[in-house]
Image (cartoon, rainbow, N blue to C red):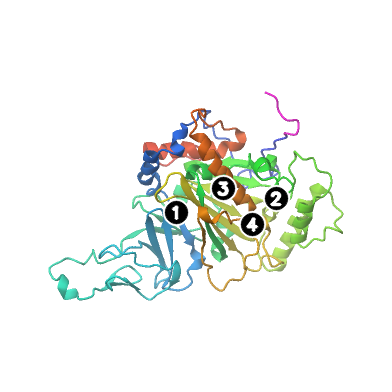
């Protein structure tokens, strides 16, 4: 096979990382060379079966725990046709309920966030305490003879707080969230997401099956083709991909290092902006292209220390690079010291050929010297000191794409791919080494769809 002479793949980003550290290359996982039938991307019956076999049995991120400050604070989380209510209790614990009145099925809470001492249904006035128990039934004597002791309470579901996030699961028998996620210990926890504040929430509707969208955000093989602006800043050939148990995977994406395909010798305008954002004047910078990333790492570490943060457990790469965790089935969390982006791919509630991309950006107060986050960390221009959790911005397909150039390019490509995978001329996907996280996802997907849900040993599927 002919190969481009510019191809120089370096699969280990941190070759000096101590063995068994979070940055060390994980042992390879042999998921075989098989492929899949592309009909899983568009058949309605498969999409319907996913509800019972995947979505009702896996953990969902309902939101950051930091969005709940005081007892009575709540936020809602919608997933397909289900709606959930997340509430801080009097003891500051967190409970989750199906957001439905048990009387006649009206949605109980309509705002996406707020604070209440109790919840009242706008249909018939039934009232419920923060713990979901019945407070009052309007005209209670008219229900004499009916047992309303349980049916008059809100229906709860599994809810756990882990790594600063509120997780919910519709399966009462699900394994604890930390065990189920399958990530290396400390990978999420070290970023202390619970200390961050939500600065942006967006939901973009797109054309395509949710699996096509998920595949897109967990591989970098397409970066230089679909995103022509990225090679000046991101070396996709140095991304380190690691596979873990239960379908989880991680990757380390070097930021501030141009693609080795370009063989750049001079500092381009994108790198100058990268330096400038970190507080380095590119006009006086004396280093080479290879010196940009280490220089930014040094400056950002120094600023974090001067601002009073303990960053002794962070390696230099974490001050520039994206550390991201993919959690089965359809969540990717991109981690930076200053900010975290939670990307959730959500199936459409009625159409297997549509999906939603939900992106939540959280910021660590005081961790940056400027007034904005670097653009690659989230939505440019967001308010880094919001008085409250910002309202979610929703964009339907008819509204166009509004989540920035990278996401817009991706969503457009996903729509085009949906057309192709239904062609008689398309037999099956062919996955290379840079798409190993995609193959890993489908191995776990097959396990769930076939009903084999037992725990898996580390590093296997």
**Which one is nearer the viewer's eye here, 406 or 185?**
406
> Residue 237: percent from the left, percent from the top?
69, 39
Q: CA distance from mark 3 to mark 1?
A: 22 Å
Left-right relation of 409 to 425: right
**Residue 327 or 13: which is nearer the viewer?**
327
Q: Secondary structure at mark 1?
A: strand
Query: Is residue 461 in sight in this rendering?
Result: no
For image coordinates 59% across by 56% down, the residue present is: 403
Local crowd size for mark 1, using a 10 Å CA cut-off: few (<14), some (14–19), many (≥20): many
- Which is the main secondary structure of the residues drawn in magenta? loop
Q: Point out the frontmost of discs 3 and 1.
A: 3
Q: Nearer the viewer, mark 2 or mark 3?
A: 3
Left or right: residue 404 versus residue 38 is: right
The Cα–Cα distance between marks 4 and 1, rounded to whole angstroms, is 22 Å
Q: Which callout, 4 or 2, points at the residue further toward the start of the chain?
A: 2
Q: CA distance from mark 4 to mark 3?
A: 18 Å
| Local SS, label 4 | helix
Of the 4 image quadrants, the one containing the N terminus is top right
The relative height of residue 43 versus residue 82 in the rendered view (above or below) is above
Query: For residue 144: magenta?
Result: no
Q: In the image, what residue occupies the spot 75% across and 34% down?
A: 6
Q: Which residue is mark 2?
A: 255
Residue 377: assigned label: 4
User: Closer to the observer: label 4 or label 3?
Assistant: 3
Q: CA distance from mark 2 to mark 3?
A: 22 Å
Point out which mark residue 60 bears.
Answer: 1
Q: Position of residue 215 (x, y in %)?
A: 54, 42
């Amino acid at each position: 096979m002919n190969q481009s002479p510019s191809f120089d793949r370096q699969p280990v980003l941190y070759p000096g990382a101590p063995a068994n550290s979070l940055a060390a290359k994980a042992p390879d996982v042999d998921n075989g060379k098989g492929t899949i039938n592309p009909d899983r991307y568009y058949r309605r019956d498969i999409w319907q079966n996913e509800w019972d076999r995947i979505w009702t049995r896996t953990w969902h991120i309902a939101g950051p725990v930091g969005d709940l400050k005081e007892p009575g604070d709540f936020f809602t989380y919608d997933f397909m046709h289900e709606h959930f209510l997340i509430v801080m209790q009097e003891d500051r614990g967190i409970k989750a309920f199906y957001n439905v009145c048990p009387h006649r099925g009206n949605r109980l809470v309509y705002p996406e966030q707020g604070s209440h001492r109790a919840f009242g249904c706008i249909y018939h006035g039934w009232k419920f305490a923060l713990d979901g128990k019945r407070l009052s039934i309007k005209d209670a004597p008219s229900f004499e003879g009916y047992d309303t002791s349980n049916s008059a309470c809100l229906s709860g579901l599994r809810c756990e707080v882990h790594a600063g996030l509120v997780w919910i699961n519709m399966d009462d028998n699900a394994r604890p969230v930390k065990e189920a996620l399958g990530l290396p210990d400390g990978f999420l926890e070290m970023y202390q997401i619970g200390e961050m504040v939500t600065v942006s929430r967006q939901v973009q509707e797109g054309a395509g099956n949710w699996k096509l969208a998920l595949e897109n955000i967990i591989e970098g093989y397409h970066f230089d083709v679909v995103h022509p602006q990225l090679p000046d800043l991101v070396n996709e050939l140095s991304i380190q991909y690691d596979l873990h148990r239960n379908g989880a995977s991680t990757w380390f994406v070097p930021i501030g290092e141009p693609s080795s395909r370009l063989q750049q010798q001079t500092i381009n305008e994108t790198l100058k902006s990268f330096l400038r954002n970190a507080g380095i004047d590119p006009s006086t910078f004396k280093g080479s292209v290879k010196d940009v990333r280490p220089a930014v790492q040094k400056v950002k570490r120094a600023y974090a220390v001067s601002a009073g943060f303990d960053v002794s457990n962070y390696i230099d790469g974490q001050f520039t690079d994206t550390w991201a965790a993919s959690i089965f089935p359809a969540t990717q969390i991109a981690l930076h010291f200053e900010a975290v982006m939670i990307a959730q791919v959500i199936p459409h509630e009625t159409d297997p050929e549509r999906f939603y991309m939900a992106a939540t950006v959280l910021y660590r107060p005081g961790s940056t010297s400027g007034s904005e986050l670097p653009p690659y960390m989230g939505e440019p221009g967001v308010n880094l000191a919001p008085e409250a959790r910002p309202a979610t911005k929703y964009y339907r397909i008819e509204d166009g794409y509004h989540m920035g150039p990278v996401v817009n390019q991706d969503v457009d490509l996903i729509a085009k791919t949906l057309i192709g995978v239904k062609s008689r001329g398309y037999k099956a996907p062919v996955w290379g080494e840079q798409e190993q996280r995609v193959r890993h996802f489908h191995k776990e997907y097959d396990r769930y769809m076939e009903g084999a849900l037992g725990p898996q040993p580390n590093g296997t599927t």
